[in-house]
Image (spheres, grey):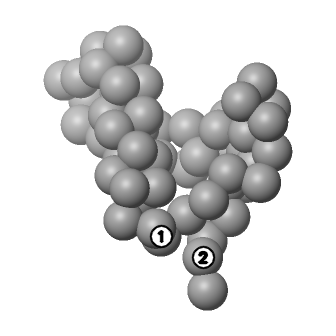
Amino acid sequence: MSRAEIDELLWNKLPDWMTDGQKKKKVENLIMELRKHNKIINKGSFKHSSWELVS
């Protein structure tokens, strides 16, 4: 799943009072937290990320 797909999936779930910048940062923080806890890994490159769940 690409970062754009993750953004699309979560964007409307975030509160309306958040600005686009805040929403982008929130999704970034969620991805970072999942990565730190070894729940997801990046199978792509830095520029073309492809996130996958860890089994």
What residue is drawn where x is 36% and y is 65%?
Answer: 37
Instruction: Please state if 23 lies on the left or on the right of 52 as rendered.
Output: left
Place of residue 54 in the rendered image (x, y in percent of width and height, measured from the top left): 60, 76
Residue at the farthest left position: 17
Tell me, yes or no, whether the two marked residues, 2 and 1, touch with CB atoms within 8 Å: yes
**Any part of residue 13 in sight:** no
What residue is drawn where x is 36% and y is 13%?
Answer: 21
Q: Earlier in the sequence, mark 2 or mark 1?
A: 1
For badge 2, the amino acid type reads Val
Cα gap from disc 2 to disc 1, whole angstroms: 5 Å
What residue is drawn where x is 40% and y is 44%?
Answer: 32
**Any part of residue 38 in sight:** yes
Task: Tell me if residue 16 comes above or below residue 32 in the rendering.
Answer: above
Residue that label 2 marks? 54
Instruction: Please state if 55 lies on the left or on the right of 25 as rendered.
Output: right
Residue at the farthest bottom position: 55
